[in-house]
Image (tube, rainbow, N blue to C red):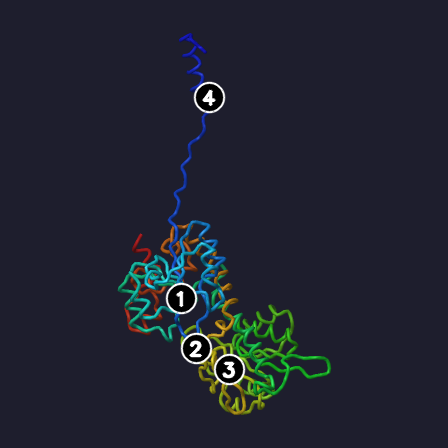
Amino acid sequence: MITDPELLKQLMQQGSLLPKEETLEVARKKGSLFIGIPRETSFQEKRVALVPDTVSLLVANGHRVKVESKSGDGANFTDNDYSEAGAEIVYDTKEIFHCDLIFKVAPPSADEVEMMRGDQTLISALQISIQPKKILQELMQKKVTAIAWDYIRDESGVFPVVRTMGEIAGTSAVLVAANLLNTFNGGKGMMLGGIPGVQPAEVVIIGAGSAGESAARAAIGLGCSVKVFDNSISRLRRLQNDLGSRVFTSVIQPKVLAKSLMRADVAIGALRAPLGRTPCVVTEQMVSDMKAGSVIVDISIDQGGCFETSNITNHNKPTFVVHDVIHYCVPNIPSSVSRTASFALSNIFSPLLMDMGSCGGPKDMIVKNPGFRGGVYIYKGVLTSEVLGKVFDLNYKDIELLLMGMK
């Protein structure tokens, strides 16, 4: 022990000159998300917005997730699956609609909007054709920020939800057609595809988007003879390059299309309109000239359909016959493979939600991410969609100008 006062003073002065640890500012932890997953009540909607694996990831990163009981039943996920993933199972629907962020598949119903407390964020699909004006006005009155997931773009400028659901619908359409060609389903008794020594089935696909490309890929994989029609040369060229094989492609010329349909065993309508109704490119006369027992699968039926003979059906009674041609016109094909579709949706939104949490929440995500901002149609009660404004004669403001005014 040092007792000399002079020596102790010298040692203290030397110690003050020794290097010390630098004190750095600790980054402020962003607030966690509070997400509610309601049970879907729309007709034959079996998908769920988030699967248990994604819920587990969110909870592990400090976010809170409430799931309404039986939300995952349609996709074969149990309440126990969600509970083990860390979700809070809720039996009162109102409790779900009091969460800060409501995440669902179908657009909200009037009853669901009424249960919302206001000043929340809603992420769901936007179906302009069935979106009532009253619901929009109610969302605006409650100062809700509403985001249409089918209008969100990724970093490459693509609509990931539209593309993914289109891929599911396109592949499923070929599988549906294969089943309908079965003798016991009223079909021609053909196998969709080809085997050595037997002429392969002919498939005509109208539309070269994601659904059309997936349908073409599935049909080629089965050994079918495939013809693809679209009015966009660039889409047809991209399809050729992506498939890696030469298939017959053509712009939609009525005479060429009619001749191909006469020989077709399966016709798949996969056109998609950016806004409004899908163009009807196949007339009733063209359908009447098709072979008896052939099959039409109209994926475009949710936008009106591209066959003149198409009428909306459902999963309980999916087909009808016109001019001896079997028509399958179910608007929500991905719901028939709800588990796969739910995983696909979760794969898209799990990184988005993680990014949203790290940047501070939905409002900060809207400012930071232009692709995510593109899905906003109501921002804090202000309508920002020009299309909805013109369709329903409502005042709207551009989201970019609105954000600039709030800075």
On screen, residue 235 above or below 95: below
Q: Earlier in the sequence, mark 2 or mark 3?
A: 2
Mark 3, residue position: 328
Q: Earlier in the sequence, mark 3 or mark 1?
A: 1
Mark 1, residue position: 39
Q: Earlier in the sequence, mark 4 or mark 1?
A: 4
Q: Is residue 398 left or right of residue 278?
A: left
- Viewer-closest of 346 and 268: 346
Asked whether disc 1 touches disc 2, contact meaning CB atoms under 8 Å apart, the reply is: no
Q: Amino acid at mark 1?
A: Arg
Where in the figure is residue 110, as x and y percent of width and height? 31, 70
Q: How packed is label 1: few (under 14 Cα within 10 Å), some, or many (20 or more)? A: many
Q: How packed is label 2: few (under 14 Cα within 10 Å), some, or many (20 or more)? A: many
Element on which disc 4 rests: loop
On screen, residue 16 above or below 22: above
Mark 2, residue position: 303
How far separated are the C-alphas under marks 1 and 2? Answer: 25 Å
Q: Quadrant of residue 304?
A: bottom left
